[in-house]
Structure formats: C-alpha cells, structure tokens
C-alpha cells in the first residue's frame, strides 16, 4: 500500500516539477549554445539570469510541493477522502516522506545535470589546477578515513538520519497549526519561527558549548546521530498521534 501511495504522490508532484526541470535544462542548453558561439551580450546575460533563477525555482518549488502534498490532502476537505482510505497514519506519513525525499533527489540531479551541460566545452585546466591545489588535503582526508573506517560509518549514519529531519519538523509544524480554527497559515509561520528560534537559542547556549567539551570525534558524531534520530522519531510519533486523534479538517 505504501508503494501505491508513493506512486500517487510522485505523480502529483512530478506533473508540476517536470515543467521546471524542462525549463531548467532548456535554459542550460540555450546558455551553452550562446557561450559556444561566443555571443557575449545582453541576451547571454539575460539567459544566464534566467538559468540561475530556474535553479532557484527548481529547489523552492520542490520544497513547496512536498510540503503542500502533506498538508492539502490531510488537513483540507480532501482529508475526508484521504483519511477514509484503508491505510494507517504510519503509511501516510512514510509515503509522503519518501516521495518528498525522492522529489528532492530528482531536483538535485536535474540541477547537477544543468550545471554539467553548462560546463561542456569549458577549459578543464582550471578545474585541474583547483584539484591540484586541494589534492594534498583530499589525500590526507582519504588516508585518515581509511585508517579509521568507523568514522566513515558514523558520517554515513549522520547523513542518513539527518535527511528527513527538516521535512518531519515541517510536518509537525503544519500538523500543530491545523489544530487552530482560524489563520492556520499564519499560525504555521508563527510556530515555525518559534520552533527554529528556540532551537537556535538551545543550540547556542547549551548544545554547542557542551559538544565543544568532547574531545573524541566518535563521541561527538554519535551524539549528533542520537540527537538527529531523536528529533526524527519524536516528530514522526507526534505527527502520527495528531493524524490519529486530532485532525481538524477544513471544509
């Protein structure tokens, strides 16, 4: 069932996101052609601006769509249909979370492809010089990682557990905001501002000073992993509780 839900979510996101991807790749190709024929003028500058705006739009649109696909089907009139399906709250959350991560991966890949298209035909000697400049540092880093394989495992785990954190936090903020009977969008912004302000203060005043006292990189990374994992689990469980017991649908 989760697979079917993910397929539905990806279709809903993809039918909008594909146009941004086409526009981004189109601007990259046009800009590459203009640079290849050495047309340096206002047209090239304009297309370059549109190219960078397209990259920004691709990223912002992906995030907005993933957030919208969580809120609208659950907390508006569509929620009567969504919540009446024979699926659990866990399946709904997992499907929306995984589809959002896939959409973000697609957006990242499209941006990378667009940049690679732009780099076709460039003088790679510049990049060779850059690599030669940072080569010794990369070699030392690689040697350090080879001598301490556990560090690689910890870095990978930290990356994995931190991936869904931002989305789950936003899911929780939207879930709490829908409990209000009026001005839900405004309340979501208010709760989000209060949450991130509180996290920033907590991090600066307590967490960061405490972590600075830790000398072992392994202990430091393990604590970071535990914190990220705890945030993920807490957000997931709170969102699940709200979906099961506290949904206040907008008619």
Image (cartoon, rainbow, N blue to C red):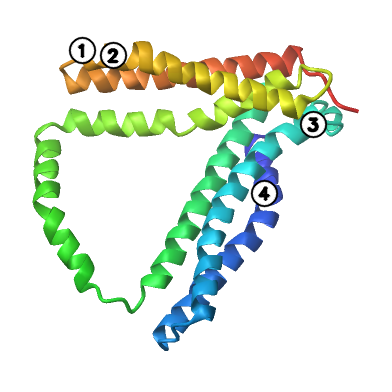
What residue is disc 1 on?
213
The foreground one among 203 and 177 is 203
The foreground one among 86 and 125 is 125
Residue 96 point in image, percent of width and height:
63, 35
Residue drawn at the location 36% of the way across and 71% of the way down? 119
Distance between the alpha carbons at the discs numbered 2 and 3: 45 Å
What residue is disc 4 on?
13
What residue is disc 3 on?
82
Specify which label sits upstream in the sequence, 2 or 4.
Answer: 4
What residue is disc 2 on?
209
Please identify the quarter of the rendering in which residue 188 is found.
top right
Mark 3 touching mark 4, by CB under 8 A?
Answer: no
Specify which label sits upstream in the sequence, 1 or 3.
Answer: 3
Eye-nearest disc, 2 or 3: 2
Q: Position of 5 compared to 165: left or right?
A: right
Please identify the quarter of the rendering in which residue 63 is found.
top right
**Could you tell me if residue 184 is visible in this image?**
yes
Residue 47 point in image, percent of width and height:
54, 73
Q: Residues within 10 Å of mark 3 (few under 14, many from 20)?
A: some
Specify which label sits upstream in the sequence, 1 or 4.
Answer: 4
């Amino acid at each position: 069932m989760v697979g079917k839900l993910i397929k539905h979510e990806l279709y809903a996101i993809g039918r909008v996101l594909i146009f941004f991807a086409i526009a981004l790749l189109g601007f990259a190709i046009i800009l590459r052609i203009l640079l290849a024929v050495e047309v340096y003028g206002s047209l090239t500058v304009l297309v370059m601006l549109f190219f960078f705006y397209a990259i920004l739009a691709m990223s912002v649109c992906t995030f907005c769509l993933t957030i919208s696909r969580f809120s609208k089907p659950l907390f508006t009139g569509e929620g009567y249909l969504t919540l009446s399906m024979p699926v659990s709250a866990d399946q709904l959350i997992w499907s929306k979370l995984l589809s959002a991560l896939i959409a973000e991966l697609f957006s990242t890949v499209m941006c990378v492809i667009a940049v690679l298209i732009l780099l076709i035909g460039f003088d790679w000697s510049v990049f060779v010089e850059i690599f030669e400049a940072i080569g010794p540092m990369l070699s030392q880093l690689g040697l350090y990682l080879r001598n301490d394989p556990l560090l690689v495992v910890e870095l990978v785990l930290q990356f994995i557990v931190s991936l869904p954190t931002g989305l789950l936090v936003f899911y929780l903020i939207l879930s709490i905001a829908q409990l209000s009977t009026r001005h839900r969008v405004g309340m979501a912004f208010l709760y989000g501002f209060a949450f991130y302000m509180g996290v920033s203060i907590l991090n600066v005043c307590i967490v960061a000073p405490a972590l600075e006292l830790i000398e072992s990189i392994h202990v430091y990374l393990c604590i970071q992993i535990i914190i990220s994992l705890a945030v993920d689990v807490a957000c997931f469980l709170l969102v699940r509780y709200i979906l099961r017991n506290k949904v206040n649908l907008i008619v």
